[in-house]
Image (cartoon, rainbow, N blue to C red):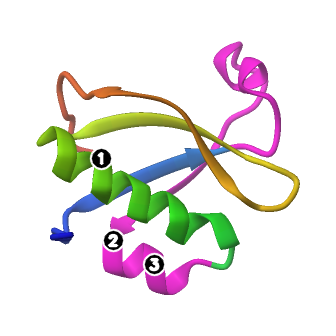
Amino acid sequence: TVIENQNIVIEFAPTSGDKVVQGEINPFRLSGTFTELSSAADAFWINDLLKALMDLKEAYHHELDIEFVVDQKDQFLLVQQRPISSLHASH
């Protein structure tokens, strides 16, 4: 797998997705390169998530927006993926 060191943004919240969508909870945000996030990961699921993201990017050849859950055993599970239609710079 070829890993490009482009910025990755991971947003997550220790709650149901409904609460995030309804604006009741603001998710945590991690951003950085694959290498930065991988080396700084203190949650078991982050490295699995990063590998899955890189595998999906390589398979589909475009930037992705993915939704995932982490189960009670700290295992990452992919729920949905779709192409990102536009990228915006952070301010």
Residue interval drawn in magenta: 13-41
3 or 1: tag closer to the N-terminus: 3
Question: What amino acid is at disc 1?
Answer: Leu
Q: Which amino acid does label 2 sit on?
A: Phe
Give residue 34's mark: 2
Label 3 secondary element = helix
Q: Is mark 2 on a helix, strand or loop?
A: helix
Question: Does 72 appear above or below 19?
Answer: below
Residue 24: give its label.
none
Front of the two marks 3 and 1: 1
Say which of 89 and 46 sits in front. 46
Identify the residue position indicated by label 1 in the image. 56
The quarter of the displayed image where residue 20 is located:
top right
Q: How far apart are marks 2 and 1 (CA)?
A: 14 Å
Residue 68, x across and y down, in percent: 59, 39
Residue, x 29% and y 58% (percent of image)? 54
The label nearer to you, 2 versus 1, is 1
Q: Above or below — where is 29 with respect to 45?
A: above
Q: Which numbered disc, 2 or 1, marks the residue that appears first in the sequence?
A: 2
- Asked whether 71 falls inside the magenta stretch, the response is no
Q: Please tell me which residue lies in front, 18 or 53.
A: 53
Asked if the stretch drawn in magenta spans residue 21, the answer is: yes
- Which amino acid is tagged 3? Ser
* Pointer 2 with pointer 1, Cβ within 8 A: no
Callout 3 touching callout 2 (CB < 8 Å): yes
Mark 3 = which residue? 38
Q: Residue furthest left?
A: 61
Q: At x 19% / y 34%, what residue is drawn?
A: 87
